[in-house]
Image (spheres, rainbow, N blue to C red):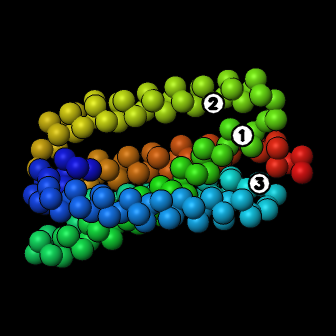
Amino acid sequence: LQTYFTDVLKLDLAFLTTLQLVSTVFIVAANLVVGQLIERTKTLAGKARPWLLLSAPLLTVTGILLFTVPSGSQTVQAIWVMVSYNLFYSFAYTIFNMSHNLMVPLSTRNSKQRGTLASLTNIAGLGVMGAGSMIFPLLVSFALKENQALWFVAMLAVAIFSALTIYLQYLFTRERVTEEL
């Protein structure tokens, strides 16, 4: 995203840094709100799973918005980036992240099983993070260069793939602790 904003859209690095700093306040507030919403949720699907399911289309739409910045004035682009960035990170990603992270403690009361699940989740997360933050940007930068349309197509594919994997997580996980209650 940073590469796209700086190399393709040519946005000012000071603006992007300020955006990330200011957005942190919204992200923290959103985490508190979403945590309370999940805690108060009572459905047959559980507490976190409905929010996980909701996050799939939200992440897809807001992720696409990040890469559909209209061409034109820097002011219009800056406003679009501010709004879409906060919709993604303060809203959609917060819903996904909170519900995803709650799946381990809600899956079992057995501490050994929870420990194993937490380890596997962390290993998978670190692997994705490593590939996503080191390898993927290099490959994408070389292949897509400064072509905004190619960036959009690539990120559309990533967004759709993410939605499908989140949906699979929803289908193949259970909140046994919530079911006991």
Residue 77 in sight in this render:
yes
Q: Is residue 41 left or right of residue 150?
A: right
2 or 1: tag closer to the N-terminus: 1
Give the residue pinned by disc 2: 118
- Front-most of residues 58 and 126: 126
1 or 3: tag closer to the N-terminus: 3
Name the amino acid type tagged 1. Answer: Pro
Q: Residue at x 19, y 47 (%)?
A: 3
Q: Is residue 42 above or below residue 100?
A: below
Q: Is residue 9 left or right of residue 111?
A: left
Q: Residue at x 50, y 51 (%)?
A: 163
Q: Residue furthest right?
A: 180
Image quarter for residue 62?
A: bottom left
- Front-most of residues 38 and 72: 38
Give how far apart the Cα atoms at labels 1 and 3 are. 12 Å
Image quarter for residue 41?
A: bottom right
- Point out residue 93 in the picture as x, y percentages from the top left corner: 47, 55
- Point out residue 79 in the picture as x, y percentages from the top left corner: 24, 74
Give how far apart the Cα atoms at labels 2 and 3 are. 19 Å
Q: Is residue 66 left or right of residue 110?
A: left
* Nearest to viewer (mark 2 / mark 3): 2
Circle 2: element type: helix
Q: Residues within 10 Å of mark 2 (few under 14, many from 20)?
A: some
Residue 88 in sight in this render:
no
Give the residue pinned by disc 3: 46
Circle 3: element type: loop
2 or 3: tag closer to the N-terminus: 3
- Point out residue 87 in the picture as x, y percentages from the top left corner: 41, 66
Name the amino acid type tagged 2. Answer: Ala
Give the residue pinned by disc 1: 105
